[in-house]
Image (cartoon, rainbow, N blue to C red):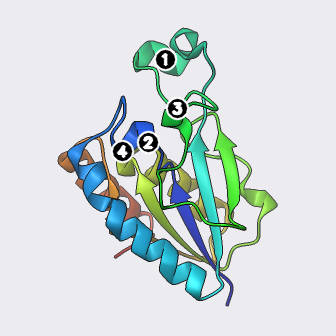
């Protein structure tokens, strides 16, 4: 069975940059270990990058979250040091959930990354809708939310939608 690891938005701005949190910093070693596990098994690895332009504050999202972050080609937009791997697929997404997962074929997918309560849950639910027969899981030790409370709420939502939370 083909296995895929999707690493959601493990970017500098979400870890220790403009929207960073202590919880995000704490999961980096767990995510690194998970990536190494998939890489050593020869499994597929996909990284998503939250991607905005210089005009972010003028966008609908920017008006609700007025913190400039993940502007394309800046340090904050880049995947954190030590996580990126050769031959991984990179997806730049302009919104919380990537809307073109249907271009892939997934059998067994595990999601990790940031933020559990925004981009991880959005992508997990899109994947579940597009691939109802695929095994979809989220590793809670490799995710962090905006707050610990909203992280736990997102995990509960995913469980209710038959996404395995480990």
Q: Find residue 62 and name its label.
A: 1
Residue at the image point whose x is 58% and y is 44% from the top = 49
Tag 2 and tag 3, C-beta contact below 8 Å: no
Which of the two discs, 2 and 3, labels the residue nearer the N terminus?
Answer: 2
What crowding class fits label 4: few (fewer than 14 Cα within 10 Å), some (14-19), or many (20 or more)? many
Q: Image check: 95 left or right of 30?
A: right
Q: Is residue 21 above or below residue 101?
A: above
What crowding class fits label 1: few (fewer than 14 Cα within 10 Å), some (14-19), or many (20 or more)? some
Mark-to-mark CA distance, 1 and 4 = 19 Å
What crowding class fits label 3: few (fewer than 14 Cα within 10 Å), some (14-19), or many (20 or more)? many
Q: Which residue is mark 2?
A: 12
Q: Closer to the observer: label 1 or label 4?
A: 4
Which of the two discs, 1 and 3, labels the residue nearer the N terminus?
Answer: 1
Depth check, front residue: 165 or 140: 140
Q: Is residue 59 above or below residue 18?
A: above
Residue 131: horizontal and vertical position, in percent?
Answer: 66, 68
Residue at the image point whose x is 60% and y is 57% from the top = 47
Residue 25: horizontal and vertical position, in percent?
Answer: 29, 51
Mark-to-mark CA distance, 2 and 3 = 8 Å
Tag 4 and tag 2, C-beta contact below 8 Å: yes
Q: Which residue is mark 4?
A: 15
Which of the two discs, 1 and 4, labels the residue nearer the N terminus?
Answer: 4
Q: Which residue is mark 3?
A: 70
Mark-to-mark CA distance, 2 and 1 = 18 Å
Mark-to-mark CA distance, 3 and 4 = 11 Å
Q: Secondary structure at mark 1?
A: helix
Depth check, front residue: 107 or 76: 76
Q: Image check: 13 left or right of 104?
A: left
């Amino acid at each position: 069975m083909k296995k895929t690891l999707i690493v959601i938005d493990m970017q500098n701005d979400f870890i220790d940059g403009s929207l960073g949190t202590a919880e995000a910093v704490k999961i980096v070693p767990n995510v690194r270990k998970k990536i190494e596990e998939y890489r050593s098994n020869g499994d597929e690895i996909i990284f998503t990058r939250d991607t905005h332009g210089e005009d972010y504050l003028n966008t609908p999202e920017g008006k609700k979250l007025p913190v400039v972050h993940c502007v394309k080609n800046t340090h904050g937009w880049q995947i954190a040091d030590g996580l990126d791997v050769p031959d991984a697929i990179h997806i730049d997404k302009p919104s919380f959930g990537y809307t073109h997962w249907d271009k892939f074929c997934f059998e067994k997918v595990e999601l990790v990354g940031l933020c559990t309560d925004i981009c991880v849950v959005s992508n997990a639910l899109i994947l579940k809708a597009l691939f109802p027969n695929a095994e979809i899981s989220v590793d809670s030790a490799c995710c962090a939310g905006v707050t610990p409370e909203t992280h736990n709420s997102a995990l509960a939502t995913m469980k209710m939608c038959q996404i395995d939370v480990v």
